[in-house]
Amino acid sequence: MARVIPRKPRRDDDPPIDPVGATRDVLARCEKAGFVCAGIAPVQGTAFAHELRAWLQAGKHGEMDFLERDNHIREEPGKIMQGVREGVGDGVQDREQQARAFIVVADQYASRQDSDHEPHEPLHGRIARYARSRNYHDVMKKRLHALADALRIDYPGSDFRTCVDTAPIMERELAALAGIGWQAKNTLIINPRLGSYVLLGVIATTLPLIPTSQRVPDSCGTCTRCIDACPTHAITPYSVDARRCVSYLTIERRSPIPPDLHAGIGDWIFGCDICQEVCPHNSPRPDPTRAGETHPAYDADASRASLSLLQVLGWSETDRREAFKTSPMKRASLAMMRRNALIALGNAIAGIMGASTDRTRVSELRDQIESVANDTNQPELVQQTAQDVLRRLEAVE
Ligand code: SF4
Ligand code: SF4
């Protein structure tokens, strides 16, 4: 839902806008707002319109139907300002102006200094790094709105629309155009200094800004580490089949996860960082001062790196709400979290079965899954997943 930003009208005696000075000013404000880097992207249709259409037609977006909507705006991004409502009461009207530039900003949410695959307790499910701290939507939107509001006051007559994740724009392509990084084979933006643990935000504006001229060259070269390491073979260079991606499966997919993908999910219960962990551009730097700085709002809560699978299985809705209060994990419903925990538990049991002689422990854990499979009070999603996991374990034995 677009936010209502009352525009300050332009008066005849307001000085003309100098695009060079305005660009310098905007970028300085982005830095002051704590964004680790920023740039200006031009307003032009996506260069990947054909690929995007083919990707959607092949159904590779899975259940993310929202990606099909407003696709014309991705091809004509100047239209992003239309539909932004302004005014109050009877005076509310849709704006008709075209965007003239995109201000693209990035926050670093994890340091490349700790990008190693860290061990964690047994029977715990892992959580992607971006979800171990405060909800980035809230952190970023608040600062982008403040920035847009200040610009609106200082540049009368100009419109601004803030976009974090939800607007129909190609954020990563815009980030590449703004010189923030290159769009890599795993489709993420990689900044040469910071790596890929960055979150992007955009302000579309009618302010005439000068696009950043310096682009970051693609430095993936002949590397295929992310493609080789992806546990579900979701990556083909520069494209990810969301239907196979563990991030999509554990966060976006609301229905049961196909059993043939269970093993690839491993111990992830919310997201997946593998294609970032293996990337050489995320490896620790010899000089940590050159590795960027994680914004304090994203200081990771160590207890959030993983969650006990058995605890998640036993959670009530109140427990889930309490645990995810300020977290982006609130996107996952209780049934989805139980589904994810069951799959990770099945994978853990399969691992124990191969390596341990502790048959009692294995059968205790199996009993827990069996009781979920037989519990008619569980949502169908959870019951069915428990049954799928049991079937897989029978096959493994
Ligand atoms: S997030 Fe995980 S599953 Fe998705 S593409 Fe990367 S490595 Fe593959
Ligand atoms: S792992 Fe290699 S191919 Fe993949 S994004 Fe990083 S540099 Fe590019």
Image (cartoon, rainbow, N blue to C red):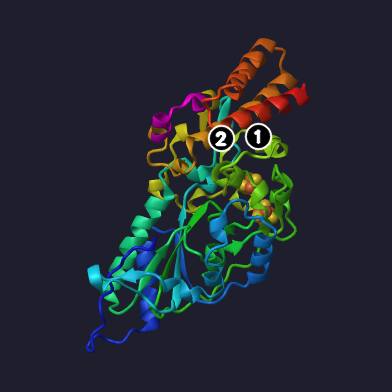
Neighbourhood count class around disc 1 (C-alpha, 10 Å): few under 14, some 14–19, many 20 upward: many
Question: Which of the 4 quarters of the picture holds residue 124?
Answer: top right
Q: Cα distance, mark 1 to mark 2?
A: 9 Å
- Give me the residue at 48% from left, 54% from top: 292
- Give me the residue at 40% from left, 79% from top: 97
Left or right, residue 227 beside residue 73 = right
**Picture coordinates of residue 34, whole percent (x, y):** 38, 57
Identify the amino acid type marked 1.
Gly
Taking depth in this image into account, of 160 and 195 the one nearest to the observer is 160
Above or below, 288 against 5 in this view is above
* Labels 1 and 2 touching (C-beta < 8 A): yes
Neighbourhood count class around disc 2 (C-alpha, 10 Å): few under 14, some 14–19, many 20 upward: many
The range drawn in magenta is 311-321
**Picture coordinates of residue 354, whole percent (x, y):** 75, 21
- Give me the residue at 62% from left, 14% from top: 364
Left or right, residue 84 beside residue 166 = left
- Provide the major secondary structure of the magenta segment: helix
Quadrant of the rendering where the C terminus is positioned: top right
The residue pinned by badge 1 equals 266
Is 177 a magenta residue? Answer: no
Task: Say which element carries label 1.
Answer: loop
Task: Find residue 126 and name its label.
Answer: 2
**Picture coordinates of residue 137, whole percent (x, y):** 42, 52
User: Outermost residue toward the top?
Assistant: 360
